[in-house]
Amino acid sequence: MAPDKSRNKIPELVMGVKNNAALKACGKYADAVYFSLDRLSLRSRAQDITAEKLADFTEEIHNNGLKGYLAVNSVIYPDDLQELDHVLEYAVSADIDAVIAWDPATIVKAAEKDLRIHVSTQANVSNQITAEFYRSLGASRVVLARELDLEHIKQIKEDTEIELEVFVHGAVCQAISGRCYLSAYLLGKSGNCGECSQPCRWEWSLHSDNGAIVDVEGKYLMSAKDLCMIEYIPELVKAGVDAFKVEGRLRNTGYTATVSECYREALDLFNAGLYERSKVLSLKEKMAMEYNRGFSTGFYFGHPGPDSLAFNFDMNASPVKREAVGIVTNYYSKRSAAAVKLLEQGLNIGDRIIIEGNTTCLEQDVRSIIHEGESVNNIEKGNEIGLAVKDTVRKNDRLFRIKK
């Protein structure tokens, strides 16, 4: 399917990253990355990029030819205002390309510091007047509400000058634009401050008014499937979308690499006039091998129905599973070997493994295990082993086994 020449602007591909390893994984495919510090974001578990490391991380982003967008998108309480000033000062010093925000305090303060502002999907921008309102505050881009369909997006684009970014892939929250209070109410961990415990992904039972448990098909009654729009890139481009956003800052590095590569290939096919759904379906199948909850098109073509919920999946619908095995305790470069403590389970010759860390992403087969000076074919958990590795790994990197 050839691209529409009247709207041939290819959207920017924006990937979520959590550390240097994830940045490296998508560096050849993305146009920009978004990430957060260890504070004031909706991903409080993302701890690898501290304020002190921000300038170096941003420099690495720019060295890869990418733009870097800093998410400062949590609710700002009075006690957070001083910290907000500090974070934004770090952003200025680091030459961040844009700050992603939705709390008016963050928007106002970022504008005062002449930072480029992208309004987060948390703001629930659902019409052109709201988009223009944020432009009047100094924003250059809005990340539209995920509850919009394609026709709504077209209408907004026709009546505003601001850039429009939309989510095209990744986890979908049950709440309107992610403003959920369920985790805060049940566990005292606010999703709006980055601490969501994802109770919508738990097993739930349905009870009738008389106290009887209703028999329903499936257990995960509130767990939405992941968004996947790779089959509909022509429709999104024709709608005038300026940027494609991929959710998944906390997912593993393999996910970041595969999804960024697939969307880049699909965008390049479209740009070259070679886009065909049959070709793109193979890319979708490739992404299905990475962590996912099943795929849906969200609200893009109308209100989601039962097919958009992952009733029977315990988080991961992929046939490929990652099993935690242990942790790297040392690396010996001269011997191309790592010392590994087997904390969760044992290991066998021939196992497919991944070793991941802040700056590490290594996938290989286990080809040599040394235990107490002897070569062994398998070893149980609780032991410390020497493991032959084909590239550099680092202390505290995590080791996973891949099972298909």
Image (cartoon, rainbow, N blue to C red):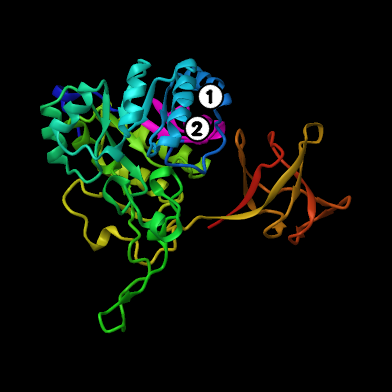
Tell me the SS state at disc 1.
helix
Residue occupying the point 41% across, 32% down: 71
Residue toward you, 269 or 144: 144
Instruction: Give the mark count.
Output: 2
**Residues at discs 1 and 2 in contact (Cβ within 8 Å):** yes
Let me know if residue 100 appears in the view.
yes
Residue toward you, 61 or 264: 61
Q: Amino acid at mark 1?
A: Leu
Q: Mark 2 — residue?
A: 37
* Residue 93 relative to residue 8: left or right: right
- Which image quadrant for residue 168? top left
Residue toward you, 266 or 42: 42
Question: x%, y% of residue 164?
Answer: 24, 29
Q: Is residue 60 above or below residue 213?
A: above
Of callouts 1 and 2, which one flags the residue occurring earlier in the amino acid sequence? 2
**In the image, which residues are magenta?**
13-39
Let me know if residue 266 appears in the view.
no
Most extreme residue toward the right is 373
Quadrant where the N terminus is found in the figure:
top left
Residue toward you, 240 or 39: 39
Most extreme residue toward the front is 78
Question: x%, y% of residue 295?
Answer: 33, 52
* Residue 11 relative to residue 133: left or right: right
Residue occupying the point 49% across, 36% down: 39
Q: Mark 1 — residue?
A: 54
Q: Amino acid at mark 2?
A: Leu
Tell me the SS state at disc 2.
loop
* Residue 341 relative to residue 273: left or right: right
